[in-house]
Image: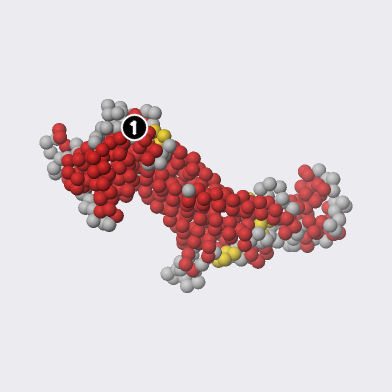
Amino acid sequence: MKTNASWGGRFSEGPKEAVAAYTESESYDRNLAPQDIRASKAHARMLARQGVISAEDGATLVEGLDAVAREIEEGRFVWKPELEDVHMNIEARLTELVGDVGKRLHTGRSRNDQVGLTYRLFVSDALVEWQRLLAALIARLVHRAEDHAEHILPGCTHLQPAQPVSLAHHLLAYAWMLRRDHARLTDTLKRVRVSPLGAAALAGTTYPLDPQSVAREVGFGDIYPNSMDAVSDRDFVLEALFDGSLIMTHLSRLCEELILWANPNFGFIRLSDGYSTGSSIMPQKKNPDVAELMRGRTGRVNGALVGLLTVVKGLPLAYNRDLQEDKEGFMDASHTVMTSLNVMEGMLAEVTFNTDRMEEACRRGFLNATEMADYLVGKGIPFREAHHITGHAVALAEQRSVTLEDLSLEDLKSLDARIDKDIYAVLDCHAAVRRRETPGGTGPKSVARQLAMLKTWLDEAQSSRQA
C-alpha cells in the first residue's frame, strides 16, 4: 500500500493491508465530520487573525470547508479508507477543492489536539441531546403523575408491601432521578467544553496562536493549562459514559417495575400492543420485551465505561494510539441512551394504569400497620411499645385471615384498652397517604409541590434550550 501523504515522508512503503484495515477509524469517526469542519473553520479564522496565514487564505479555507460539508450532507463525499480517519479525508478533499492553500489548514496543530477538540464537540452535542430527551421523559412522568394524584398503590421495601403511597408520588420518584441526571450532564458539559487546540502534538507550538478565541468561537468556556494533559485527557468521555450509565440504570429500574406490574399476578398496568410482543408458541402471551431489552442494554453502556477505563488506566503521557478506542464505545452508548429515553417516553405515554387493582392490593399485606402504631403513639404510648402492640394485632389478623381494619373493636381493645373506635378512620389507606405531608412525603400537598417544582424547572430548561 502507498504511504499516507499526511505522514509518510520518512517511510519507503505504507502499512500492510491487514495493518491498514486494523488501524483505520474512518469507518466510524466519519460521524465526527460536522464537528471536525466546525473546529477547522474556527482554526482557519484564528490563523488568519493572528497573521499566521493571509486573510485571503483564511477565507479560502473556510469556503472550501463549507463546500466539503455540503458534499458530506448531500452524500456526494467519497470516503477513502487509506486516508485513515475523518480528519485526513476532509483535509485531502479540501486540498483537491482549493489547491495548495488547503495544505495550510494544519498549520500550528497536530492530529492530537485536532482530534481532541473535534471529539469534545461531538460529545458536547450528544450530551445536549441527552438533556433534551431527559426533559421530554420528565415531562411525560409529570403529566402521568398529574393524572393519578388521587390513586394509591402499595409502596414497597425489600419488594414487600410496606406503606400505601400515591401513584403520582411513585412516578415522580423517577422524574427526580432523571432530573439529577440532567443536572449531572450540565456539570459534565463544563469539563467537556475545554479546548485542547494549541497543544499541538504534546508540547505546544511556536506559532503565535490564540487558542482562547477558537474556544469561544466553538462555544467552549476554557482552554487546557497543560499541553500534555490536553492531548491525553479522556476524562470528559469517561464522565459522559458514567452519566450515560447512570441514566440507563435509572431507566432499568423503571423497566423492572413495569415488567413486574405488567405481570397478571400484579396486574397494575397494561402495556400497549405497540410496546409489547407475543410468543411463537403460547397464544395468550403479551411480553414486555421493550422494557426487557432496555434493562439489558444498560450493560452495553456500563461496558463502554469499563472498557475505556481499562484503556486509559495504563497509558503514559502523552498521546497514545490506544486512545483511538475512545470513540466506538461512546457512539454505541450514546445511541443506546438516546433511543432508550425516546422509547421510554413513548411507552409511558401509552401505558394504562389499573388503579382499582392497585388500591385492592393496598388491602393486602397490612400496609396500614404503621398507621396503627402511630395512632397508639398519639394515645401516649412510647413508639417501641406501640410497635409491639401493633405486631400482636398483625399476628391476630393473620391467624384469622383478615385485615387489621376487619378486627373488631373488642379484639383491638384486648391488645390495649386505650384503642377506641376512631382507629378505623386511621387505618384507611387513603387517609394514611393524606396525612404524610412532610417535605418530600406522599401526601397530596407534598405531591402538588413536587409537580409545581418540576413544571417550573421544565419551563426553565425549555427557555435555556431556546436561548
Q: Is residue 75 visible?
A: yes
Position of 43 relative to 290 (above/below): above
Position of 19 relative to 71 (above/below): above
Q: Which residue lies furthest to the front in this view?
A: 56
Relative depth, front residue between 455 and 370:
455
Q: Name the residue under label 1.
A: 210
Q: How far from the left and from the top, in percent, is residue 210?
A: 34, 32
Q: Which residue is drawn at 76% across and 47% down?
A: 387
Relative depth, front residue between 125 and 105:
105
Relative depth, front residue between 62 and 297:
62
Q: Which residue lies furthest to the left in this view?
A: 12
Q: Residue at x 72, y 51 (%)?
A: 436
Three-letter code, disc 1: Asp
Q: How far from the left and from the top, in percent, is residue 47?
A: 28, 35
Q: Can residue 85 be seen in this view?
A: no
* Crowd tier of the residue under label 1, counting other residues whose Cα lies within 10 Å: few below 14, some 14–19, many 20 or above: some
Q: Residue at x 48, y 51 (%)?
A: 466
Position of 155 relative to 208 (above/below): below
